[in-house]
Amino acid sequence: MTASSRQQQPQPPVPGARILVVEARFYDDLADELLRGARAAITQAEGVAEVFTVDGALEIPATMAILLDRAEASGTPYDAAVALGCVIRGETGHYEIVAGESARALMDLSVARRFPLGNGILTVENDAQARARARVDEMNKGGGAADAALAVLRIKRGLVTGF
C-alpha cells in the first residue's frame, strides 16, 4: 500500500480530540509548511490543534512532557501529540546528536505514557530534501506525522478493529 492510497482511505473522525503540536522554528519557512500539513490533517479528522513553539528539535521532547503534565494536572489532557521540526546535516557531528536524541526522547515519551505521538522532525542531508518533505503538495511530512498520531489515537479509542 502506498502513502497516497493510505491517505485516500476514509478514517473514522476523532471529533474534539485535543492534539498537542510542538514545533521547532529553527527553519521558519519549513516549520510553516510542516505546521500547515499537520493542521490540515487534524482538522480533517475533526480534531483541534494546540500549537506551541520552541527554538530547536532538542527542546521538543521536554516541552511536550511539560505540557502533557500541565494539561493532565488541569483536567484537560491531550489525546495525542505531534512533533514538528527539521534537522539538516552540517559539517559536524551535532546532526547525529540532535536527530538521534530527539527521536529517542519522543519514542520514550510515547511508549512510557502509551500516548499517540507523531514524529514529524525531518532529518535530511540538505535544504532541497527538507523542502520536498515539508511541502504539503509534495511529501507532506507534517500531515503524515499528524496522521500517524491520529492512527494510534484511533486504536487507543477502539475505533479500529481487527486486533
Image (spheres, helix red, strand yellow):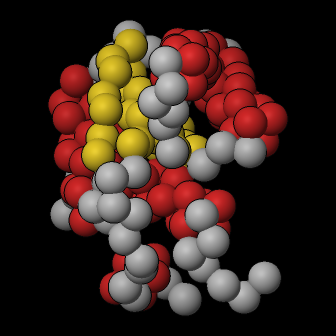
Residue situated in front as seen by the camera: 125 or 57? 57
Residue at the spot 24% in from the left edge and 57% down from the top edge: 43
Residue 99 x %, y %: 62, 28
Residue situated in front as seen by the camera: 156 or 34? 156
Residue situated in front as seen by the camera: 87 or 59? 59
Q: In this view, does 62 lie to the left or right of 147?
A: right
Q: Write down the quadrant of residue 104 in the picture.
A: top right
Q: In this view, does 112 lie to the left or right of 5?
A: right
Residue at the spot 56% in from the left edge and 75% down from the top edge: 159
Instruction: Classify 45 as above or below 40.
Output: below
Residue at the spot 28% in from the left edge and 61% down from the top edge: 46
Instruction: Classify 156 as above or below 128.
Output: below
Residue 28 x %, y %: 22, 24
Identify the image quadrant of the C terminus: bottom right
Q: How many labels does the image show?
A: 0
Residue 123 x %, y %: 53, 38
Residue 146 x %, y %: 42, 53
Residue situated in front as seen by the camera: 87 or 114? 114
Residue at the spot 41% in from the left edge and 27% down from the top edge: 22
Look at the image and tell me whether residue 99 can be seen. Answer: yes
Look at the image and tell me whether residue 96 can be seen. Answer: no
Which residue is situated farthest in the front direction here?
75
Identify the image quadrant of the N terminus: bottom right
Instruction: Classify 37 as above or below 23.
Output: below
